[in-house]
Image (cartoon, rainbow, N blue to C red):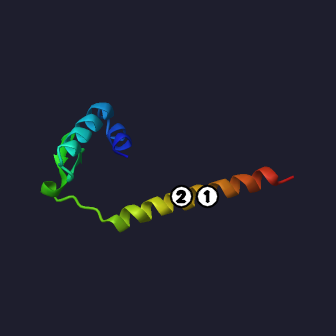
Amino acid sequence: MPTIIADNAGYDSAELVSQLRAAHQDNKSTFGLDMTQGAVGDMATLGITESFQVKRQVLLSAAEAAEMILRVDNIIKAAP
């Protein structure tokens, strides 16, 4: 996801993801992408938090949407 977020913001995703991985290797688990600055930053300091439940629900909703699209596609293909 960090790659997609950085790309969508117009930043060099390879560089930012590399910096983020290095920060996580240094046990900086609260670090993430600060898209206002185009850099890696401490999300706790920036006041950005997201619960596990939110992330879980987003992934479940995405999977359900994909399943629905596939079902509609199959129905359209099966129509005479």
Residue 64 vs 14, above or below: the answer is: below
Residue 73 vs 61, above or below: the answer is: above
Image coords of residue 40 (percent x, y): 20, 42
Image coords of residue 27 (percent x, y): 18, 48
Disc 2 and disc 1 in contact, CB within 8 angstroms? yes
Left or right of 12 in this view: 63: right
Residue occupied by mark 2: 63
Compare residues 33 and 52 and report the one nearer the observer. 52
Q: Report the label total.
A: 2
Three-letter amino acid code at disc 2? Ala
The residue sitting at 29% across, 38% down in the picture is 17
Helix or strand or loop: what does disc 2 sit on?
Answer: helix
- One can see residue 36 in this view: no
Residue occupied by mark 1: 67
Q: Residue furthest right?
A: 80
Q: 10 Å neighbourhood of mark 1: few (<14), some, or many (≥20)?
A: few
Q: 10 Å neighbourhood of mark 2: few (<14), some, or many (≥20)?
A: few
The residue sitting at 34% across, 65% down in the picture is 52
